[in-house]
């Protein structure tokens, strides 16, 4: 048991590192490619950057499905959404980066509310049939199409993203591909290590998914938030969190259900964790729809609440 634990811990940490590096390479490479192909910056923000920071969740979920550990797959998505709201957005608020969400935030907050209601329904049912998974993906595509058209009509746009990558497409393409390879390799290591930790310490796979895996896959969002806070870019952090939560529910669970021929959801998620997701997401959605200020004190309370939730899972 001790030998297994010593091997699994470093495997999880290495998986985290590869996920972070891979996500960074994919986003930077894709932004450079989009710039060379003259793809509108708004479309880049809606698709490439948002999906890029959610690739670790997708990789981990698909790897967990391949290993037959649906608890880690579903727990990773539920826990990631809680981490995005409480830890990532809470951190942004403490840094003062969530004070000015910007245009379109009510639309995105409404999308999060709708996606969370869908998530609540499938968790209570206990299964996502593959047919419904396809519908979830179509719904996500429709949301992106609608948001893009409305934003273009409003005349809003997204600033060009800073990138450390030289402005050369022949370099950007292999960098993007290498980033994808790092993400999938990191996902394999993270799932293998997390599964081993669960077995060696007698921790359920659902708890590992809700905590270790969820925190690991939320690191790209946290990194984007910290950068936004340090640069004083209000609205970047809020939009990143809302977009990631919609992608996690509609996109990642939709892909997992379609890919696996139907995703089974453990009953224990319906008794506790889905309500934490509903409570945390509902709190933020209500504040944004009411145009309330998410200040530093609220942010500190959110981070404290997340730490308390982690303690509850293990105690």
Image (cartoon, rainbow, N blue to C red):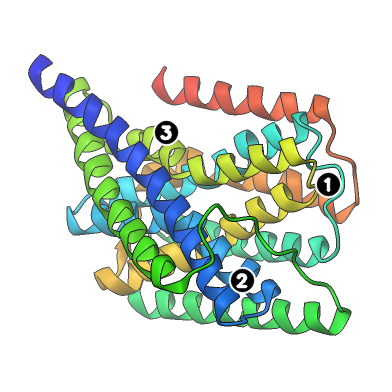
Q: Position of residue 225 (x, y in %)?
A: 65, 42
Quote the CA–CA distance across marks 1 and 3: 26 Å
Which residue matches tag 1?
A: 287
Quote the CA–CA distance across marks 2 and 1: 28 Å
Q: Position of residue 191 (x, y in %)?
A: 25, 43
Depth-wise, is mark 2 or mark 1 nearer the camera? 2
Which residue matches tag 2?
A: 44
* Residue 267 in the image: above or below residue 162: above
Instruction: Write down the quadrant of residue 258 in the picture.
Output: bottom left
Depth-wise, is mark 3 or mark 2 nearer the camera? 2
Q: Position of residue 108 (x, y in %)?
A: 73, 64
Q: Earlier in the sequence, mark 2 or mark 1?
A: 2
Q: Earlier in the sequence, mark 3 or mark 2?
A: 2
Q: At 56% from the left edge and 82% from the top edge, which residue is drawn?
A: 37
Q: Nearer the viewer, residue 269 or 140?
A: 140
* Rendered image: mark on residue 117: none
SS at mark 3?
Answer: helix
Asked if residue 75 shows in the view, the reply is no
Query: What is the crowding at mark 2: few (fewer than 14 residues within 10 Å), some, or many (at least 20)?
Result: many
Q: At 51% from the left edge and 64% from the top edge, which residue is drawn?
A: 51
Q: Nearer the viewer, residue 271 or 249?
A: 249
Which residue matches tag 3?
A: 211
Report the side of 40 relative to 83 (left or right): right
Report the side of 20 relative to 222 (left or right): left
Query: What is the crowding at mark 1: few (fewer than 14 residues within 10 Å), some, or many (at least 20)?
Result: few
Q: Are marks 3 and 2 in contact (CB under 8 Å)?
A: no
SS at mark 1?
Answer: helix
Q: Earlier in the sequence, mark 1 or mark 3?
A: 3
Q: Position of residue 198 (x, y in %)?
A: 23, 30
């Amino acid at each position: 048991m001790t030998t297994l634990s010593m091997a699994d811990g470093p495997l999880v940490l290495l998986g985290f590192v590869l996920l972070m590096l891979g996500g960074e390479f994919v986003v930077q490479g894709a932004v450079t490619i989009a710039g060379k192909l003259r793809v509108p910056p708004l479309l880049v923000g809606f698709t490439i950057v948002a999906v890029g920071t959610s690739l670790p969740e997708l990789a981990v979920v698909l790897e967990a499905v391949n290993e037959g550990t649906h608890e880690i797959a579903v727990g990773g998505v539920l826990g990631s959404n809680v981490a995005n709201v409480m830890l990532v957005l809470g951190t942004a608020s403490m840094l003062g980066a969530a004070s000015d969400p910007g245009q379109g935030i009510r639309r995105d907050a409404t999308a999060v509310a709708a996606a969370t209601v869908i998530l609540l329904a499938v968790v209570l049912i206990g299964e996502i049939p593959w047919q419904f998974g396809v519908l979830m993906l179509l719904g996500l595509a429709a949301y992106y199409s609608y948001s893009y058209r409305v934003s273009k009509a409003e005349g809003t746009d997204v600033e060009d993203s800073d990138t450390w990558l030289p402005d050369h497409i022949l370099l950007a393409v292999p960098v993007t591909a290498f980033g994808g390879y790092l993400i999938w390799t990191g996902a394999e290591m993270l799932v293998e290590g997390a599964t081993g930790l669960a077995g060696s310490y007698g921790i359920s796979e659902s708890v590992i998914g809700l905590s270790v895996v969820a925190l690991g896959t939320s690191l790209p969002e946290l990194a984007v938030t910290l950068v936004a806070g340090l640069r004083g870019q209000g609205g970047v952090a809020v939009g990143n969190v809302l977009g990631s939560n919609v992608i996690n529910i509609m996109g990642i669970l939709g892909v997992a259900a379609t890919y696996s021929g139907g995703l089974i959801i453990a009953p224990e998620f319906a008794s506790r964790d889905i309500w934490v997701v509903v409570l945390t997401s509902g709190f933020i959605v209500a504040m944004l729809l009411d145009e309330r200020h998410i200040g530093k004190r609220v942010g500190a309370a959110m981070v404290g609440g997340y730490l308390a939730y982690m303690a509850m899972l293990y105690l």
